[in-house]
Amino acid sequence: MSSAARTPDRHPGLHDSAFLKAARGEAVPHTPVWYMRQAGRSLPEYLRVREGIGMLESCMDADLVTEITLQPVRRYGVDAAIFFSDIVLPLKAVGVDLDIKPGIGPVVASPVRTLADVEAIPDLTAEHVPFITAAVRALVGELGATPLIGFAGAPFTVASYLVEGGPSKEHAKTKAMMFGAPDVWDALMRKIAGIAAAYLTVQVEAGASAVQLFDSWAGALTPADYRQHVMPHSTRVLAAAGELGVPRIHFGVGTSNLLPLMGEAGADVVGVDWRTPLDSAIPLVGDRGVQGNLDPTLVFAPTDVMTARAAEVIEAGRAAKGHIFNLGHGVIPSTDPAQLERLTEFVQSYPLD
Ligand code: CP3
């Protein structure tokens, strides 16, 4: 059964949205644009509704999730919404003791070290995340023909938070487990992949029309290690989303050497950070679309400098099977929303013929 059949209340214009067309590699009326971390601290209306409410607490409040997800769509008129949540939310939902600390990121109370630690993490079912189902359903109704992107953290990136206990530059403990305790590593990656697949399934069944798998820290790996220790698990997650019939975007940071493998893992669109020019990335991803990749600091440049660089990104993207415009990583919190508004307008009105 197709995902469309599961969600009969989808807007008739959704299928023909520029975002979904580009994700499928079809011709588009304009280059679709959205921004990673578009819902968040760069928006005054976000800071207002979040006042006095913890990050994870707000992710578990369906009304707040709905409001925060819609804020950048209202302000910028972007071509897609991304569901407001975090990559560690599903772990919190199954009972892992963790928090998201402002200015730091996810912090895990008891880092995972042994097979017993892995086995103590429950698998995720829809009953763990009723607020997700409720928020996605509400959003799909509000968004009409604007697609909602569901997302999950990829097994390697989520494993890094679980094993390190918090953010890490080197991912040394994580890679020590990968190299030195392959049985524990395999069990952990299977556990996280199962949770991510279940989490994406909940979002798609409730109405999300595309998914993005964030493997933000995969760039720490050599291609051989990625292929052997990580890729099979990400492949399982992407395959689960593929079975639901929605396009899959696969993104990482510093992954120029992994782009072919990230595509092969089962992506329809490969996200490219700003360090790799799109014209070098496109031949590497094969018969797939690309997403990206304006340097997120360019929004701090004069508008004409920013738009000239955006034009280069759009022009380079034309050689791809499909191109979704984005920043090369998330919106920096001090970004001026007015500048993103100008960027959105520029991309959407850039002539393609
Ligand atoms: O893109 C969106 O607008 C949707 C929301 C979203 C958040 N996190 C909200 C958030 C998404 C897609 C994420 C994914 C995420 N979370 C990733 C992958 C994407 C990436 O940036 O590479 C990662 C690595 C995390 C882990 C995480 N959560 C970090 C590193 C941080 C930042 C810590 C900080 O305060 O500097 C978070 C917290 C977080 N996630 C915030 C938001 C809006 C900030 C929390 C706040 O407002 O207090």
Image (cartoon, rainbow, N blue to C red):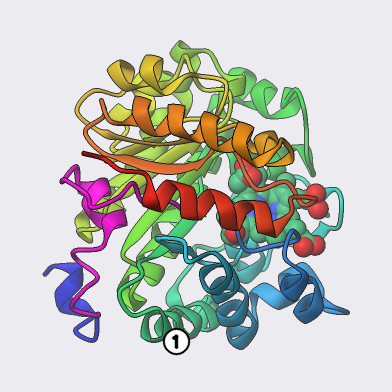
Instruction: Assign a secondary structure to mark 1.
Output: helix
Counting from the top left corner in percent of width and height, residue 11 is at 24, 80
Q: Please name whichever residue, 221 or 351, is drawn nearer the observer in this view of the structure.
A: 351
- Nearest the eye: 312 or 140: 312
Residue 37 lies, in percent from the top left, at 62, 54
* Residue type of the residue flagged with mark 1: Ala
Residue 44 placement, left or right of 31 = right
The residue at the point 56 percent across, 63 percent down is: 122
Magenta-colored stretch includes residue 39: no
Asked if the magenta segment contains residue 20, the reply would be yes
Q: Is residue 176 above or below residue 201?
A: above
At horizontal 26% and vertical 38% (from top left) the residue drawn is: 322
Main SS of the magenta segment? Answer: loop
Q: Does residue 126 appear anywhere in the picture?
A: yes
Q: Mark 1: is the Cβ under 8 angstroms from ligand 1?
A: no
Residue at 80% from the left image edge and 78% from the top image edge: 48
For the question of whether residue 98 can be seen, the reply is: no
Q: Can you say whether 197 is above or below 95 in the image? A: above
**The quadrant where residue 39 appears:** bottom right
Using residue 320 as the reference point, say whether residue 148 is left or right of it.
right
- At label 1, counting other C-alpha atoms closer than 10 Å, the crowd grade (few under 14, some 14-19, many 20 or more) is some
Q: Which residue is mark 1?
A: 138
The quarter of the rendered structure image containing the C terminus is top left
Q: Magenta part of the protein: which range?
A: 11-33
Please give the name of the residue rendered at 69% of the width and 58% of the height, measured from the top-left corner. 337
Q: Residue furthest left?
A: 1
Residue 29 point in image, percent of width and height: 23, 52
